[in-house]
């Protein structure tokens, strides 16, 4: 028992020998080392060895510089050395980065990185799972107009609410080769409110078809029969979204199809989000995601580099 | 103390002038600190020729970066740049595998040349001691080597070392303690090479 306590004290004292030798130790630490060295031969021997080593180091001569290291104007020019004025503003930045990746910073870099990653996950969760969210919707919102004519998968989504012969028509519309036609758009307006709402920019609420309300179901009827299909006329996609947005604004358009009406209600939040997209800017949450994401990546890189350096040092 | 204060003021003046692009003012700082910079580099890399390159690189880097120097100790700031230059050199050597630490040690400088009162035997011993010490220093981990060099070879205070090494006083103390202990162990394994008065097993 006594031996174990002695060993623990030896370890503690050996950790203080350097300070004791430099005369910077005070208080309880100083008393501990003094008392211990008086009764412990091993530690005294250790201390003597340390003192001799430091004594040798202090006797190492300071060597004269082998030559002058002054910079010549030619050397400055030839070396492409910029004027201090020109690069001064970079110094705080590079200095901060250099200080950040010091090996001793690993201690706080790791938890900071973990925190940033958790924050990123939290923000993503709020964005995608929160009210009016949904990753799929978000994606469609981001490039809804492109997908309307070019992305088959989106077309497949639209088909969920369509029954009967309208399927063929939808497939055509979703194909990149066939531009949207008014008849198809009407069909979407009546039968696919849920999907179409995603393409609703608030700034482009119906102008040419502003009077279009409630008769979508008739047109759908026609399309379903496969009879009244209008001649495909290339129409700019904003028209598509306009009609679609109408469908979103007035769920009654698709009254004849219960399932799609439900979808329209469920996606009300997506319409709101789309509004901000169509209005010309990203939602704040997207910027927060990017900010936290970039921070997390930078911290991750800094932590990795600092840990690598620490490993090198330990090796 | 008074002269130290004057030296600091002059440093600040020279730094200000250097920041204005005055190369002559910067070169006065070079003249003032090149011996210190070279010696730190020498103990860090363990090789005279490499230390010369490192020192020159450090002064070039210092001139480039002096626009961003925001006051404090110029000496500590410069030594930090010297240390970074040493690290760059180590990494380059490690990558190129052209100059190992052992190879550096073969060219390691030793104690200064024999003086008038010293016998050739004494000089030989002293030279051998310097070689062993240099080797021991070079074998310390980089951070410990820096702290031991600055403290025991260059005589810097704990506070100055903390500023150079960008770490806390506690870290300086612990690195110094571990570095010295490690160096002592290294020297103890080479007792036969040491002069009698430096034998550690007495």
Image (spheres, coloured by chain):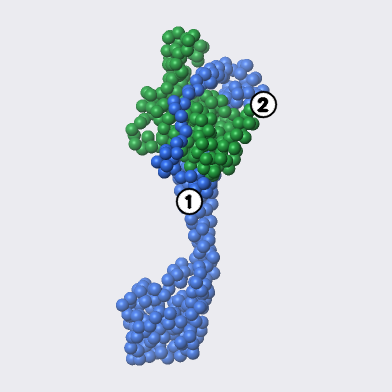
Chain colours: A blue, B green
Residue occupying the point 41% across, 86% down: A186
Most foreground residue, A156 or A49: A49
In the image, residue A17 above or below residue A295: above
Q: Residue most toward the left?
A: A177
Question: Residue B36: percent from the left, percent from the top?
Answer: 51, 28
The tag on residue A298 is 1
Question: Residue B56: percent from the left, percent from the top?
Answer: 44, 34
Most foreground residue, A109 or A190: A109
Q: CA distance from mark 1 to mark 2?
A: 43 Å
Tell which circle, 1 or 2, labels the residue nearer the N-terminal end.
2
- According to the picture, the residue beneath numbered tag 2 turns out to be A26
Q: Chain of mark 1?
A: A
In the image, residue A75 above or below residue A179: above
Q: Chain of mark 2?
A: A
Quarter of the image where one finds residue A172: bottom left
Residue occupying the point 46% across, 21% down: B133
The tag on residue A202 is none
């Amino acid at each position: 028992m006594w031996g174990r306590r002695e060993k623990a004290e030896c370890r503690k004292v050996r950790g203080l020998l350097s300070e004791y030798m430099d005369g910077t130790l005070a208080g309880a630490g100083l008393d501990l080392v003094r008392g211990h060295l008086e009764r412990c031969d091993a530690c005294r021997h250790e201390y003597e060895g340390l003192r001799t080593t430091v004594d040798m180091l202090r006797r190492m001569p300071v060597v004269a510089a082998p030559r002058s290291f002054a910079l010549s104007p030619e050397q400055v020019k030839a070396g492409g050395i910029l004027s201090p004025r020109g690069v001064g503003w970079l110094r705080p930045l590079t200095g901060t980065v250099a200080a950040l990746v010091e090996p001793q910073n690993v201690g706080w870099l790791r938890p900071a990185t973990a925190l940033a990653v958790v924050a990123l996950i939290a923000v993503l969760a709020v964005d995608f799972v929160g009210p009016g969210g949904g990753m799929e919707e978000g994606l469609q919102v981001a490039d809804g107009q492109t997908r309307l004519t070019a992305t088959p998968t989106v077309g497949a989504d639209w088909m969920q609410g369509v029954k009967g012969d309208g399927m063929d028509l939808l497939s055509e519309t979703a194909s990149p080769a066939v531009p949207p036609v008014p008849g198809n758009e009407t069909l979407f307006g009546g039968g696919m409110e849920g999907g179409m709402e995603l393409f609703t920019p608030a700034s482009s609420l119906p102008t040419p078809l502003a009077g279009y309300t409630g008769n979508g179901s008739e047109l759908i009827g026609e399309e379903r029969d496969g009879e009244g299909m209008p001649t495909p006329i290339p129409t700019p996609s904003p028209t598509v979204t306009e009609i679609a947005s109408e469908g979103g604004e007035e769920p009654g358009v698709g009254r004849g199809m219960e399932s799609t009406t439900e979808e329209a209600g469920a996606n009300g939040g997506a319409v709101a989000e789309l509004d901000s997209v169509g209005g010309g800017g990203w939602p704040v949450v997207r910027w927060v995601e990017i900010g936290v994401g970039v921070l997390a990546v930078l911290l991750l890189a800094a932590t990795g580099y600092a840990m690598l350096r620490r490993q090198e040092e330990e090796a | 103390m008074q002269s130290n204060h004057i030296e600091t003021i002059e440093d600040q003046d020279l730094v200000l002038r250097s920041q204005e692009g005055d190369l002559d003012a910067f070169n006065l700082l070079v003249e003032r600190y090149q011996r210190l910079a070279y010696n730190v580099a020498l103990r860090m890399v363990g090789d005279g020729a490499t230390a010369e390159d490192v020192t020159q690189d450090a002064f070039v880097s210092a001139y480039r970066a002096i626009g961003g120097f925001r006051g404090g100790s110029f000496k500590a700031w410069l030594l930090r740049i010297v240390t970074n230059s040493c690290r760059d050199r180590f990494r380059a050597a490690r990558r190129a595998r052209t100059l190992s630490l052992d190879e550096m040690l073969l060219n390691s400088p030793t104690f200064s040349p024999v003086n008038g009162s010293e016998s050739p035997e004494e000089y030989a011993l002293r030279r051998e001691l310097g070689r062993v010490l240099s080797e021991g220093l070079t074998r310390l981990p980089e951070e410990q080597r820096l702290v031991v060099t600055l403290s025991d070879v260059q005589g810097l205070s704990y506070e100055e070392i903390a500023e150079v090494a960008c770490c806390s006083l506690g870290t300086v103390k612990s690195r110094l303690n571990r570095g010295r202990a490690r160096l002592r162990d290294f020297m103890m394994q080479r007792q036969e090479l040491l002069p009698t008065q430096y034998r550690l097993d007495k």
